[in-house]
Image: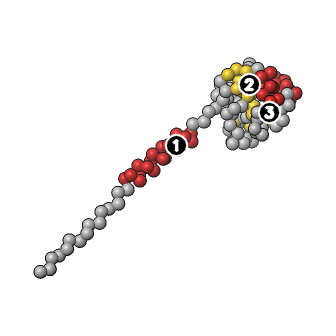
Amino acid sequence: MRLKRKPRRVLPENTIPLINVVFLMLIFFLFAGSIARDDARRIAPPQSLAEDERVRSTGALVIDRDGRLYIGDAETSIEAVAETIRSGDSNGEPFKLAADGALPASELNAVLARLSEAGLGEAVLITRRASQ
């Protein structure tokens, strides 16, 4: 007597866990990639037609329209910044400076002169892209 064997039932692959992992990674990278600290949020930088988009204001010396100096959220003095420059804590990166667009150029020039006396090498002035 011949018995028919039941054909093996092939179970479909369950792709739901894979989809869950992909969506979790997508959400993680959306949040991780979009959070960036902006130290120059309290000023309106001058406009520029040519801007290097890779330069961010994180870690920059921020000068507001009244000439007050900030590093991060802490107000600082020109002497403290000059001492930091003298100590050589720049790690080979250019010094970043974000000045308010309403700051008179003479005050910006005075700050740059003091920093140059302290041994400032290369400096980058952070601007915002002008609408064309």
Residue extending furthest toward the front: 1
Residue located beneath label 2 in the image: 63
How far apart marks 3 and 2 lie (CA) works out to: 21 Å
Question: Which sits earlier in the primary sequence, circle 1 or circle 3?
Answer: 1
Instruction: Classify mark 2: residues with Cα within 10 Å, few (<14), some (14-19) or many (20+).
Output: many
- Label 1 – label 3 distance at C-alpha: 36 Å
**Amino acid type, mark 3:** Gly
Q: Which mark is residue 88?
A: 3
User: x, y (%) of residue 116?
Assistant: 86, 29
**Could you tell which of marks 3 and 2 lies nearer the N-terminus?**
2
For marks 1 and 3, give the one nearer the viewer: 3
- Residue in the picture at 64% in, 32% down: 38
Task: In the displayed orientation, state which residue is furthest to the left.
Answer: 1
* Residue under label 1: 30
Q: Element under label 1?
A: helix
Query: Which secondary structure, mark 2?
Result: strand
Three-letter amino acid code of the residue under disc 1:
Leu
Say which of 105 and 33 sits in front. Answer: 33
Is residue 57 visible in the rendered structure shown here? yes
Packing grade of label 1 (10 A; few <14, some 14-19, many >=20) is few
Query: Residue 109: in sight, yes or no?
Result: no
Residue at the (23%, 71%) spot, across then down = 7
